[in-house]
Image (cartoon, rainbow, N blue to C red):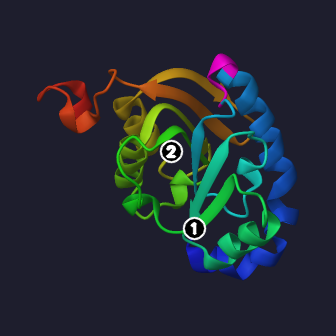
Amino acid sequence: MTDKYYDEISEGYDTLHMAEQLQKMTEIIAAMGADVPKKKDKLLDVGCGTGISTSVWACECTGIDPSEKLVALAQKKYAGQENRKFLVGNAEELPFPDDTFDVVISITAIHNFTDAKKGILEMQRVGKDRFVFSVLRKAAQLDEIEKYIIISFKVKKIVMEEKDLIFICGRREPGKRVSELKKGSAAEE
């Protein structure tokens, strides 16, 4: 599915996805335990849609999505909330410096990325140490995405949700990215 698809369904997006996404966020918060973002933290939501998955956090949230219409709806929905910012952009080219966000999430979006591996590496680059990914279990590229997540992050927990696999992750090695790990390791395969 492309950003054009989501632009076309944008007006009905919340009706279609809100209840399911909020239920998923409840499971994610429970699975994160002590790693739940604190008020002082910065969170990035990649593939944020209308901001449903940013609505549950008390911290500063930035959402990015390739759909102009979904981002416009998120901006309208959260107008006046200084701790919420939404931009149009792609996961494969995140416009942020390294280690900008304490927490990076991508909720049921990775299977829609143009290049899942590049998007995952970009999320790793801009995140510090806490990552949450939910991936549609029936996605054609689930095995490939799961492999990239396992290679790129220290997976703390996997939750089998009704429609998604939820990965609660940290950095593989403190301060190290896959590109910096020793050549020949499993991380570079």
**What secondary structure is found at the residue carrying circle 2?**
helix
Using the image, tell me which numbered label, if any, was put on residue 87. Answer: 1
Using the image, tell me which numbered label, if any, was put on residue 142. Answer: 2
**What secondary structure is found at the residue carrying circle 1?**
strand
Quarter location, residue 14? bottom right
Main secondary structure found in the magenta portion: helix
What is the quadrant of the C terminus in the image?
top left
For the magenta stretch, what is the residue range? 33-37
Residue 83 shown left or right of residue 62 in the figure: right
Residue 174 shown left or right of residue 79 in the figure: left
Residue 139 seen: yes
Q: Position of residue 115 (x, y in %)?
A: 38, 59
Using the image, tell me which numbered label, if any, was put on residue 95. Answer: none
Query: Which residue occupies the foreground of this view, 66 or 81?
Result: 81
Residue 153, above or below 75:
above
Q: What amino acid is labelled 1 in the image?
A: Leu
Q: Is residue 24 magenta?
A: no
